[in-house]
Amino acid sequence: MSAQDDILDQETPQGFRQRFADFRENRPHLFLLAVMVLVPLFFMNPVTWLSLTISGLAMGLMLFIMASGMTLTFGLMGVLNLGHGAFISLGAFAGATVVVFWMGGHAGSGTLGMTLIALLAAFIFAMAVAGSLGLLFERFVIRPVYGDHLKQILVTVGGAIIIMEMIHVIWGPNEIPVPRPDLLRGAMILDDTVPLIGGVAVETYRLAAVLLGLAVYAAMVWVIERTKAGILIRAGVENTEMVEVLGYRIKLLFLGVFVAGSALAGLGGAMWSMYQEIITAHMGETLMISVIVVIILGGLGSIKGCFYGAILVGLINLYIGYLAPTFAAIATVGLMVGILMWRPQGLIPVIKV
Amino acid sequence: MSEPILKLSGVHADIDQYHILHGVDLVVPKGELTVLLGRNGAGKSTTLRTIMGLTLLRKGSLTFKGESIAGMPTPQIARKGIAFVPESMGIFALLSVRENMDLAAVSGPIDETRLEWVFGLFPPLKRFWNRPAGNLSGGQKQMLAIARAIIEPRELLLVDEPTKGLAPAIINDLAGAFEELKEQHASILLVEQNFNFSKRLGQSVAVMDDGRIVHTGQMAELAENDELQQELLGLSLGAHQ
């Protein structure tokens, strides 16, 4: 065939400076992550740095779980669900109901088996409650306002207020303490003989949250990259009309994503409840600022962008909280402003047709 | 003319506040390649989009194999066996060529024998099977768009200006692929502005102007009649050779 047969390949960059510039421009998420992780090393000792990094990763991964559903619903259908935070709160209360009220004795008994059963039950129940309400929320609140952002903002905020009031009605107006299971209390301390980082203490729960968060991310990547449903979601984020032209019902796909996103918000809320050890009906609302920052700086509609965005937000919160506590409050928004000035489209933008 | 597979009667359609189709009457015969010609803005693409349910049908009837498809949701129309290749091609740029094709195989995994046949029509797709579709050249994207439409047997193909912006060599390759589809008696409604391409492939022809069909007949007759071409399309064969 003709010369047009050749695929458009990029030139391989030559020399260190060119390769560095290429890395910075083509992999901004990895570049920023490297800068974010390495720079604080110059301002603190390695033991503190490692402890803060693991805590930041734990926070980031929980934020990712909470935010991933919202980024997909926006990417797929352009729906701005500002009520997403209510599902985080709902998941926290549902999870707490299992851990504190139903299985309190078992979760605190200290045996590994019972702790795992209690946690698993709490997380599954949180996901089931948030996912079920997500199904109703999409059907009766979101569906009538497709394509109209202003109405979406109004009705989803209104819907969130109703959910939060429902939480007050069911669980009462007071905050509820959620003690961690005995096995996840305290910290793991690295042996003093290990060079540089010997003696570092890492909270057991944070380490567990990192592992669970990475497992959820791996599962999501697998679904998105390897399954037909995942390919459909990615295709739908790019061009919803063409997905319908091929014969797929995009509204059904969206409903599935919305329910899964709500369930993940619920899981994130349940994990967060044990991270903070106290929950209120408004905790989701408070977390929404970080969630919105994460999905904007990650690139709306991008799961990978959301993952890196969440980790960056988690890390900067912990590093700045330690180095300059007075600036901690503006760290998250400051990070977003900085990244958007450099890349207005976010870290890993999705091309929308 | 063989029996019709698709029939439009008095079709009116709007895009926002603009009234685009003013009563389109069109019959697409089964097992033939019908070309829909017309100047820019005549309503050709809107006709295809209205058939697919992407533009709202305001008035008139749309029947496919004797069954009304007016007002049906787009996915349902597609599942009836109508494939649509839009003018924009609708390639999922971030997906690989393979993933684009996987999605087009709506009824299950891709049939390997049919895939080999598609590779025979469009060899670059095999070479770039696992590469992002967004990296393909314009001609290769058009090949992928058509390959998606034929990866499963369909009753009717609607193809909107496949030659737009392509080099002559690629247009020739595409024409070869359409000729092979014709040999298999596929039913195709092809919107085109390239008269030479249309003349080479078309069996029946319809010409649109101002949201209406102003001429229908056999392509061979139109190709031989310079006066009619001048009258309907404002062109003569000489200008396009």
Image: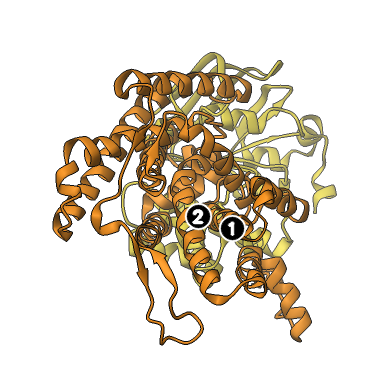
Q: Residues within 10 Å of mark 2 (few under 14, many from 20)?
A: many
Residue designated by label 2? A60
Which is nearer the eye, A39 or A174? A174
On whether disc 1 and disc 2 are found on a single subunit, the reply is yes
Q: Is residue B204 left or right of residue A276?
A: right
Q: Secondary structure at mark 2?
A: helix
Q: Earlier in the sequence, mark 1 or mark 2?
A: 2
Can you give x and y, in whole percent of width and height, for residue A240 in the image? Answer: 53, 39
According to the colouring, which chain is orange?
Answer: A
Rendered hue of chain B is yellow
Which is nearer the eye, B156 or A148? A148
Which residue does the image show at 54% across and 32% down from the upper left?
A79
Q: Residues within 10 Å of mark 1 (few under 14, many from 20)?
A: many
Q: Secondary structure at mark 1?
A: helix
Which residue does the image show at 54% across and 52% down from the upper left?
A306
Residue B184, compared with residue A165, is above or below; it is below
Q: CA distance from mark 1 to mark 2?
A: 7 Å
In the picture, residue A34 is in which quadrant?
bottom right
Q: Is residue B93 left or right of residue A67?
A: right
Can you give x and y, in whole percent of width and height, for residue B6 in the image? Answer: 47, 29
Which residue does the image show at 50% across and 40% down from the upper left?
A70
Q: Is residue B175 visible?
A: no
Q: Quadrant of the N terminus of chain A?
A: bottom right
Which is nearer the eye, B162 or A36? A36
User: Looking at the rendered structure, which numbered label has been put on residue A312?
Assistant: 1
Marks 1 and 2 close (CB-CB < 8 Å): yes
Can you give x and y, in whole percent of width and height, for residue A226 in the image? Answer: 38, 60
